[in-house]
Image (tube, rainbow, N blue to C red):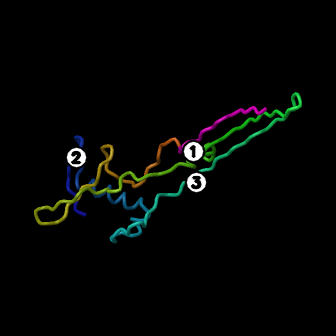
Amino acid sequence: MNFQAYTASGRTFSSAEQAAAWEAYIQQDEYLSQHRGEYAVRGAVFLPMVFRTDLSVSQDIFKSIAGRRNSLQFRVDIANFGNLLNSDWGVGQRLINAQPLTTPSADASGRMQYRLRAVNNELMTKSLETTAGFSDVYSVMFSLRYQF
């Protein structure tokens, strides 16, 4: 790869820095490291599967009052229960950027020059990052219901 040095947000990224980051990017990605030098096949890579488990526990208490059946239900609902047990479980991942290389240009001899994309003023070295949404953490809801 022929990388072009460039400056972004006051920081200059040399060709050697970009080449080293690109190598790290390829090595950490299972698909890219196994298909080096080939064209990437459309639809060959999927985001990792996320397994989430919800848990619900309820207890009913019955009592007859004035000839009518009354019940009190106590309930606990835990969304993403696995994350309650282990903070690495039930957490999704997303692509940092689907295009790690910016639009190429040609140098004076006609060779293509590339730039490795910088994210947060750092060169990309990994393809996935952990998501940080509401569904990635557990939540607990307590409820009490009275029926008469």
**Residue 51 image label:** 3
Q: Amino acid at mark 1?
A: Ser
Residue named by callout 2:
12
- Residue found at x 72% / y 33%: 145
Give whichever of 121, 61 is nearer the camera: 61
- Residue found at x 31% / y 50%: 123
The question of residue 140 being in magenta is answered with yes
- Alpha carbon of mark 2 to alpha carbon of mark 3: how far? 41 Å
Chain part drawn in magenta: 135-148
Left or right: residue 54 compared with residue 108: right
Q: Position of residue 52 (x, y in %)?
A: 59, 51
Left or right: residue 2 compared with residue 30: left
Q: Amino acid at mark 3?
A: Phe
Q: Amino acid at mark 2?
A: Thr
Mark nearer the N terminus (1 vs 2): 2
Give whichever of 106, 69 is nearer the camera: 69
**Residue 87 image label:** 1
